[in-house]
Image: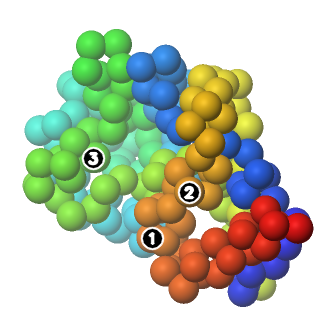
Amino acid sequence: MFQLGKTIISEDILEKEFVCNLSACKGACCVDGDAGAPLNEAETKILEEIFPKVKPFLRKEGIEAIEAQGTWIKGTDGDLETPLIDNKDCAYVIFDGKTALCGIEQAYNQGVVDWKKPVSCHLYPIRVKDFTEFAAVNYDKWDICDDACSLGKELEVPVYKFVKEALIRRFGEDWYLELEKVAEELKNS
């Protein structure tokens, strides 16, 4: 672990390798698990605002879940998250054949909304936990991502480089440049 500004970072994000392999996992992270995607307070307002524009991209089941539960919910642990369809799929998930994709991201890709998706999804496999004085930045090892780990190793892409855009979105360009310096120092030590 090391500190960078107001973040405590696991060295795993510098040392582990990862590249999403949708052809292998079929987007399992959008349909597996027991909770929706973690959200922050600002994202709940964004979801409320963009839902009418995103709605045409969603499946009937997702729309029904959102209309019944809301564009976001408080999970069993009190954290903010996306609603689920029958306690399984994220309500915003759509399918291209058998591959799960994000309906919000599809709307973003087509220029309908200017918000890509929840930052927690964009950051995966990094999970950020905010505390009063700092944020913990950790690598989340999930067996459904074994193929992503193998592909990352094959392509020699560390986690922090794979999620560069998301890390900059969450912490800023200057923070990311400092992270790169730490990674380079670690590599050369």
- In primary-sequence order, the first of circles 2 and 3 is 3
Residue designated by label 3:
104
- Whole-number angstrom distance, CA of label 2 to CA of label 1: 13 Å
- In primary-sequence order, the first of circles 1 and 3 is 3
Residue designated by label 1:
169
Q: Amino acid at mark 1?
A: Arg
Q: Position of residue 30 (x, y in %)?
A: 47, 32
Q: Quadrant of residue 169?
A: bottom left
Quadrant of the snapshot with the N terminus: bottom right
Q: Amino acid at mark 2?
A: Lys
Q: Quadrant of residue 34?
A: top right
Q: Secondary structure at mark 3?
A: helix
- Whole-number angstrom distance, CA of label 1 to CA of label 3: 17 Å
Using a 10 Å C-alpha cutoff, classify the residue at mark 3 as few (fewer than 14 neighbours), some (14 to 19) or many (20 or more): many
- Whole-number angstrom distance, CA of label 2 to CA of label 3: 23 Å
Q: Quadrant of residue 83?
A: top left
Residue designated by label 2:
161
Q: Amino acid at mark 3?
A: Ile
Residue drawn at point x = 43 percent, y = 26 percent? 22
Q: Position of residue 112 (x, y in %)?
A: 11, 55
- In primary-sequence order, the first of circles 2 and 1 is 2
Q: Nearer the viewer, residue 65 or 31?
A: 31
* Residue 128 falls left or right of residue 51: right
* Residue 102 falls left or right of residue 27: left
Residue drawn at point x = 48 percent, y = 72 percent? 168
Q: Is residue 101 above or below residue 138?
A: above
Front disc: 2 or 1: 2
Using a 10 Å C-alpha cutoff, classify the residue at mark 1 as few (fewer than 14 neighbours), some (14 to 19) or many (20 or more): some
Q: Position of residue 98 (x, y in %)?
A: 34, 13
User: What is the number of callouts on the image?
Assistant: 3
